[in-house]
Amino acid sequence: MKWLTGILLGIAAILGGLLFARGASPSVTGGEALDNPATLPALGLVDDRGQTTTLAHGDGRLRLVFYGFVRCPDVCPATLASLKNSYGTLKPQQQQKLQIQFITVDPQFDTPEVMRAYLDRFDPAFTGLTGRATTIDEAARDMFVANVKPQPVMAMDHSTHMAPPSGQGADNAEAAGAGASEAARIHGDQVSVVNTAGQFVRVYTNSEVIGGALQQDLPGLIQMYGGG
């Protein structure tokens, strides 16, 4: 029966090797990959240091892109806090391959200085982009992010929220501030993955971000889209 023992040991060794390889190569199970990766256009924007740049510009790192605004009362800070926690779970060499980028949908209020101060509350490594409202609108469309122009808010309560339009379950409605002169803003709350070549390749819903699916996938995303 020595031959049978040898076969069983061989099978065990193969299975062990497969399990080791699976552990050494993190997988990506969440989010939704685009059937056709979209190359981002060179739309002119301004970064949080006041320097001109473009939507397409990258620095060789994988990018996680989130659209929001500084005066957002709930979803934006919750999402950025979740991204901060996820970023903190990475090893230093993994962090060096990842850029978390916030793009404002309220460029009139969110100047480079305002955004920089806001992002510093989460992580100084996070970066921000602002620019002309029309350019922001175009950038959002190119990344399939809803960005509805603010509508008048009749109630005085600063917690007033507008319900998202039918069929926009992934979007969130948020009040920009108190007072009838303020306006509610509806914008997409997903997080987009942009590879090192400047291609929009994958998207995570906000529930996947808050729920931890993105955090679990980060090592695999860096390996798959960020150059290993």
Image (spheres, helix red, strand yellow):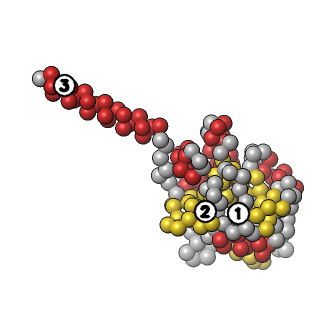
The amino acid beneath tag 2 is Phe
Q: Residues within 10 Å of mark 1 (few under 14, many from 20)?
A: some
Q: Is residue 70 above or below residue 24?
A: below
Query: Which numbered disc flags the more N-terminal residue, 1 or 3?
Result: 3
Q: Which residue is mark 1?
A: 56
Q: Is residue 212 left or right of residue 136?
A: left
Place residue 92 in its image quadrant: top right
Which one is in front, 192 or 51? Answer: 51
**Residue 206 percent coordinates (x, y):** 59, 58
Residue that sits furthest to the left in the current view? 1
Q: Which residue is mark 3?
A: 5
**Residue 28 percent coordinates (x, y):** 49, 50
Give how far apart the Cα atoms at labels 1 and 2 are. Answer: 10 Å
Give how far apart the Cα atoms at labels 1 and 3 are. Answer: 59 Å
Give how far apart the Cα atoms at labels 2 and 3 are. Answer: 51 Å
Instruction: Give the residue displayed 72% in from the left and 64% down from the top.
Output: 55
The amino acid beneath tag 1 is Ala
Q: Which residue is mark 2?
A: 200
Are the residues tagged 1 and 3 within 8 Å (C-beta)?
Answer: no
Q: Is residue 156 left or right of residue 222?
A: right
